[in-house]
Image (tube, helix red, strand yellow):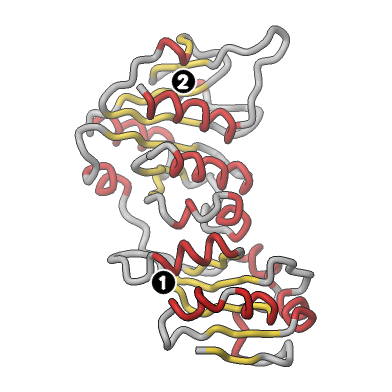
């Protein structure tokens, strides 16, 4: 349903206004996605049981003309607002060169134990503790999708994987890979142990090297925040693994670390 928009104060596009300010306060069960790849991914999954739902789309005039095939594939009752680039910039509050935004409603967050219970006898889970950087969060979800991880578990201190920037960095993976939250690391470790998962914590001080790790059938890879890494209390309760590096350097970006680890676990 094409809806021409010629004024930035058009009430029909209120949800797209002041994007950065709204990112800061959250969207209360909703999310904003941007870019063609993410929109095509969402469009291809519409109607999936229990999935995210698209509420409306905002396109620049140029992108609307270029994406006619995608627009035709969207439900007829889904509003596709189309505005000149200058008007779109005024709506969102900055120059949005991609010219593609979508508002959606997030699927209900599953309970962590139930999510783990639904996985098979051979399963790969990613767990992030205290991860507050949206770029890293998006990178971890992208790696999780690329290497076939079954789920991601986050603690309450970790940032929102459905934040606009996290979705963009993940190339939509955070909209695809199932995830759940737990209050803290202690609850996570107990949930994993009760369901037969071996928890493997990544740290430069790990007692084993990654290359020698044989994948357990049900395994969870635990990653901590940049700098401090995983707390000592966590490291003391689980198997710890390190990635050997060149002399004088012992630190990798956590998203990069997750890619290396998940590649190893997926291929073993």
**Where residue 51 appears, x then y in whole percent?**
35, 64
Q: Residue at x 38, y 39 (%)?
A: 149
Q: Is residue 180 left or right of residue 29?
A: left
Residue located beneath label 1 in the image: 53
- State the image quarter where residue 44 is shown: bottom left
The vertical placement of 13 against 63, above or below, is below
Which quadrant holds the C terminus?
top left
Residue at the (44%, 78%) spot, across then down:
74
Left or right of 190 on screen, residue 172 = right
Secondary structure under badge 2? helix
Q: Which mark is residue 245?
A: none
Q: Please, what secondary structure does the residue beneath circle 1 have? A: strand
Point out which mark residue 235 bears: 2
Pick whichever of labels 2 and 1 is earlier in the sequence: 1
Query: In the image, is residue 6 above or below residue 166?
Result: below
Give me the residue at 60% from left, 56% from top: 168
Marks 2 & 1, CB-CB < 8 Å contact: no
In the image: residue 56, left or right of residue 221: right
In three-dimensional space, the C-alpha distance between marks 2 and 1, rounded to whole angstroms, equals 39 Å
Location of residue 182 in the rendering, given as x and y in whole percent from the top left corner: 39, 45
Percent from the top left, x then y, of residue 119?
24, 42
């Amino acid at each position: 349903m094409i809806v021409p928009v010629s004024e930035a104060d058009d009430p029909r596009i209120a949800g797209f206004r002041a994007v950065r300010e709204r990112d800061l306060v959250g969207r209360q069960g909703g999310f904003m996605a941007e870019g063609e790849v993410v929109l095509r991914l969402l469009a291809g999954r519409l109607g999936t049981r229990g999935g995210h739902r698209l509420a409306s789309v905002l396109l620049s005039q140029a992108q609307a003309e270029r994406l006619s095939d995608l627009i035709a594939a969207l439900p007829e009752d889904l509003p596709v607002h189309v505005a000149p680039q200058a008007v779109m910039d005024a709506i969102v509050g900055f120059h949005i060169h991609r010219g593609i935004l979508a508002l959606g409603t997030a699927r209900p967050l599953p309970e962590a134990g139930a999510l783990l219970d639904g996985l098979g006898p051979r399963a790969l889970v990613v767990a992030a503790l205290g991860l507050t950087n949206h770029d890293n969060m998006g990178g971890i979800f992208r790696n999780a999708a690329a290497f076939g991880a079954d789920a991601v578990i986050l603690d309450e201190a970790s940032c929102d994987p459905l934040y606009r920037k996290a979705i963009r960095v993940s190339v939509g993976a955070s909209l695809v890979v199932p995830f759940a939250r737990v209050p803290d690391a202690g609850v996570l470790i107990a949930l994993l142990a009760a369901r037969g998962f071996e928890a493997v914590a990544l740290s430069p001080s790990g007692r084993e090297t990654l290359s020698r790790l044989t994948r357990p059938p049900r395994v969870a890879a635990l990653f901590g925040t940049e700098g401090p890494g995983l707390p000592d209390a966590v490291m003391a309760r689980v198997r710890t693994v390190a990635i050997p590096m060149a002399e004088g350097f012992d630190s990798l970006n956590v998203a990069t670390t997750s890619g290396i680890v998940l590649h190893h676990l997926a291929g073993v």
